[in-house]
Image (tube, helix red, strand yellow):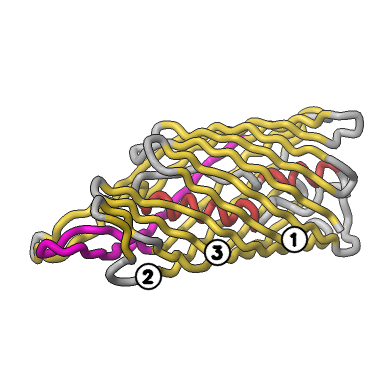
Amino acid sequence: MTSVRWLIAALFLVPALCSASANAQETSQVAQTARADSVEAAASDANDTAGPVVWVAGVSTGLYDRDGGPQSPYVTASITAYRGTAYERAAFTVYGSTLEQPDAALPSTYYLGSVGVGGNFDGWLVDAYASFGHQAYGLVETPVGRQRPTGSQGSGYFAAGLRVGRLLRPAPRLFVTPTIELQYARTRSLHHWFADGQPSDFEVPERALTGNLALRLDRAIGARNQHFIGVSFAHYESDNGLTALALDPENPDIVKAVKTADSWQQASVNGTFGLTSSLWLDLSAARTFGSVSGDSTSVSASLRLRF
């Protein structure tokens, strides 16, 4: 497998950061995290031909640090089968998150399975993925102590997306990759309040449709072009970056979820390093800007082993 192939494989490893103080934008963030290590951009460069199936196992970990909010760690294990210029991949992600209210903190742990297919077709990168799983609610933290949720103990999670890109090579060691992506995510979030002087918890639906345009620049380095360093910039638009809560005007006992549209930018630096002929290390750091619901910084690292 060529070194270019591993650049392409790493192009889609960097999660898009879209953290928020409410869970609506976080549904998109979780989907990107699961997708990022559950699919790869392509199986090979345009000069590769079909051959035996090549297997690659990967493990990654990362951390989202939201401004003025809690940190969200995650870990992913994945397996990919390369078949010529295409791939199939499956992964499992565990992701920790906390929704903060003025009077309570509501932690959750996501357990997500993810599948993806795609490939590199004459320099066109196609990437389709779906993630599904369960969000387990943790102990609700309030000024009077920690307690289990009074209602549901968890909710389902689903996300799906499609990304298309073009791999351009303006110079022997230089790669430019513009991409466009559309993603849908659906789950529920837990909230806390006091009803008749007693603590009570309730759920609201969280749904977000998010799109982004991105441009990434990579350069090969090393005697055998076995390493790549790169930078990328992306613009995001979402119909639900932040969920607000409001009383139903027709029934004050019912709390409704109100969507808030959002847009933001993300800048990142990335590196892929060939440690041996069959082992690669991927590192990334990213920062979001301009989000109505709050910005974040993230770091991640992954290892991929061919066998």
The numbered dot on residue 112 is: 3
The numbered dot on residue 80 is: 1
Q: Secondary structure at mark 1?
A: strand
Looking at marks 1 and 2 on the same chain, the residue that comes earlier in the sequence is marked by 1
Say whether residue 161 is left or right of residue 108: right
> In which quadrant is the C terminus drawn?
bottom right
Give the percent coordinates (x, y) of residue 11: 68, 43
In terms of secondary structure, what is the magenta stretch mainly? Answer: strand
Please tell me which residue lies in front, 223 or 155: 155
Callout 1 environment at 10 Å: few (<14), some (14 to 19), or many (20+)?
A: many
Say whether residue 2 is left or right of residue 68: right
Q: Amino acid at mark 1?
A: Thr
Residue in the image at 86% along x and 33% along y: 225
Q: CA distance from mark 1 to mark 3?
A: 17 Å
Q: Amino acid at mark 3?
A: Leu
Dots 1 and 2: beta carbons under 8 Å?
no
Please tell me which residue lies in front, 200 or 169: 200
Q: Secondary structure at mark 3?
A: strand
Give the percent coordinates (x, y) of residue 251: 9, 66
Please tell me which residue lies in front, 219 or 56: 56
| Residue picked out by circle 2 | 153
**Over which residues does the magenta segment extend?**
188-215
Please tell me which residue lies in front, 146 or 157: 146
Residue in the image at 59% along x and 33% along y: 268
Q: CA distance from mark 2 to mark 3?
A: 17 Å
